[in-house]
Image: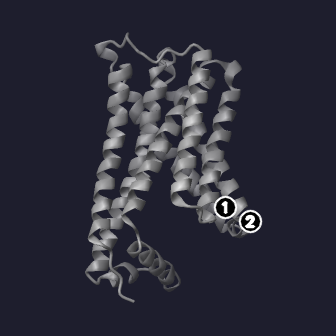
Amino acid sequence: MDLHVQNSVMVSFIVSAVLGVLLTAAGFVFMRKKFNARIKPFFVGCITFILFVSIESLCNSLLFKSSAGGVIQSKTFLFALVGGIQAGLFEEMGRFFAFKCILNKSKDDDSTALMYGAGHGGIEVIVIFVVTMITNLVLSLLINNGMTSVITSSLPAEQVPVMQLQLEKLAGTKVYESFLGFFERISALLFHIAGSVLVWIACKDRKNIFYLFIAVFAHALFDFLAVIFVKNNVNAFLLELVLFAFSALYCGLVYFLSKKNGLCFSNKTVEKAEEI
């Protein structure tokens, strides 16, 4: 079967990738200008995300290769539950580790949490969304130039049908789908900033350590709902509205808790020598 990706769809991949980069940059600039946040937490957030997600991926690989892995993958509820819990544990513990071990000298500067969240969520936009858009664009060009054999020739025989299905799905992509993906990244970025503030509160005072468990639970629930909706072919617009509403409510809760715990995000005392 001849496959073809519409030019408008390929343009949407390019525009979405650019928007993803701009979203990450906007998060950094906003935290810097609005709250006078230091630069260092942004890059700590980027590196910590990559490190802990890499460890999570390794654990997932080992788990799904085990006898239990087949059972988990065959049950949608179980797959979503395990995936959500793992994401919650690894990413929230990553935040906790970064705040306790790397950014511990900044505990009096609450803007650190915001800038860290912008870095954590921003690099996720790049790694998950922007890279995917670029990959889709490259695959689309190969498809439209009749070079699908270049894609499948290096794959093991058992993986060729899977790749063929992916290429067919790509050829059927609609323009709006890329922009829905971008909207989802906005929801996720807000979620990560809120989660960073919540874990920050947990790190500042031992009596608030239970906030860490709330962050893990919220993260697990967010990912669980996303997987359940996708696996059950729920309308994509409804999915994104639910995730955005979840993020908005989470931000509201964390804002309330930050006020309750006396956080002040406006850092007016950053010295030039300490700006990074």
- Which kind of residue does numbered mark 2 sit on? Ala
The one nearer the camera, 237 or 5, is: 237
Residue at figure coordinates x 55%, y 32% from the top left: 251
Residue at figure coordinates x 45%, y 21% from the top left: 111
Label 2: element kind: helix
Q: Is residue 202 left or right of residue 129?
A: right
Q: Is residue 70 left or right of residue 124?
A: right
Which image quarter holds the C terminus?
top left
Query: Is residue 276 shown to the viewer in this render?
Result: no
Please tell me the numbered disc located at residue 63. Answer: 1
- Crowd rating for badge 2 (residues with CA inside 10 Å; few <14, some 14–19, many 20+): few
Whole-Å distance between the Cαs marked 2 and 1?
A: 7 Å
Return the residue found at the far bottom. 1
Q: Is residue 70 left or right of residue 170?
A: right
Residue 139: quarter of image: bottom left
User: Do the CB atoms of the residues marked 2 and 1 lie less than 8 Å apart?
Assistant: yes
Residue at figure coordinates x 28%, y 58% from the top left: 14
- Give x and y (percent) for residue 142: 29, 76
- Which kind of residue does numbered mark 1 sit on? Leu
Q: Is residue 17 left or right of residue 229?
A: left
Residue topped by disc 2: 68
The one nearer the camera, 22 or 271, is: 22
- Give x and y (percent) for residue 128: 44, 54
- Crowd rating for badge 1 (residues with CA inside 10 Å; few <14, some 14–19, many 20+): some
Residue at figure coordinates x 66%, y 46% from the top left: 221
| Comes first in the chain, label 2 or label 1 | 1
